[in-house]
Image (cartoon, grey):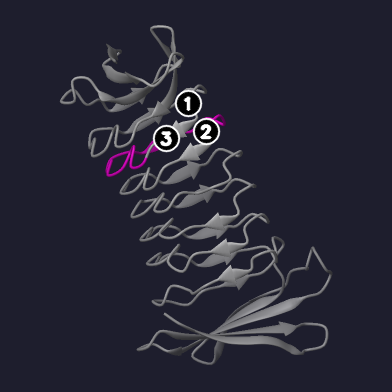
Amino acid sequence: MTIHQFGLSFSVVNEYDVKVVGFYPRSEEKTRLVIPPHVDGYRVAEVGKKAFYECSRLRHVILPPSVHIIGDEAFGLCSNLEDIVLPESIKHIGKGALEGSLKLKNVELPRWLDVLPEGLLYDSGVVEVTLPDKVTEIPTGCFYDCRNLRSIILPASVTKVASDAFHHCTALAEVIAAETIESIEMFDGERKWQLKTTQRAPKYKVVEDGQVSYTDDYEDAVRGIGWTIAMAREDLNTHSFTCEIFNNTTGELMHREEYRC
């Protein structure tokens, strides 16, 4: 059963809920989208798969607190989307939900979200992202090709970052991560990285072509031990990186590993 109201199409999911599946008629795209919480006695609980895919006129989106699911590519390739309000009620976001949103600069994800989808902000214009405290993994392609992203703080809940999660993020200067991270499989092979290993990051330095280019001092908030992360670009042609981790108290080399991208 389909319901047409407020210039939108809704598909009935069950006796209580509907999902919004797009503009109605599709040709009547708007620049501002405000989805109602209820339609004909049904709760609007979901934004359907590709509901607003390639809606190039769409600039502003407000979702009601009734919505708890956003489908795959729901707002994919909305190239002029500038802002979207995501309510705390959202528990699931599908793959590539905001991919290709070139004008989207800031995103605050719902704090109860514990799983990020693959390709969430692939090729978007995002500069700043607030990640939920419950997220445990940054999946493949999550921020791939986000060329305006400058810095990101990974919450203490994160234990793994996929190999291409930040690939081609050419403006990204630093990733601040907690000691709970077990796996950062590789780094973007195009440029140097700054890696900090605690939320109140420890002392670190970045080494490029054998020269220290940046140093800073912090305190290890977890164990009271300072560390130095030295990241050296060894070979620009093969994109080979060497990461060395030192104990600042003893000067001991704790770990050395080479990354090839």
Q: Residues within 10 Å of mark 2 (few under 14, many from 20)?
A: many
Q: Is residue 176 magenta?
A: no
68 horizontally vs 55: left or right: right
Residue furthest to the left in view is 27
Q: Position of residue 126 (x, y in %)?
A: 41, 50
Q: Which mark is residue 90?
A: 2
250 horizontally vs 191: left or right: right
| SS at circle 2 | loop
Q: Residue at x 38, y 43 (%)?
A: 97
Q: Residue at x 71, y 84 (%)?
A: 246
117 horizontally vs 199: left or right: left
Q: Which residue is mark 1?
A: 67
| SS at circle 1 | loop
Residue type beneath disc 3: Ile
Q: Please determine whether, in this image, residue 77 is positioned above or below residue 221.
A: above
Q: Please determine whether, in this image, residue 253 is positioned above or below residue 11.
A: below
Q: Quadrant of the C terminus?
A: bottom left
- The quarter of the picture where residue 196 lies is bottom right
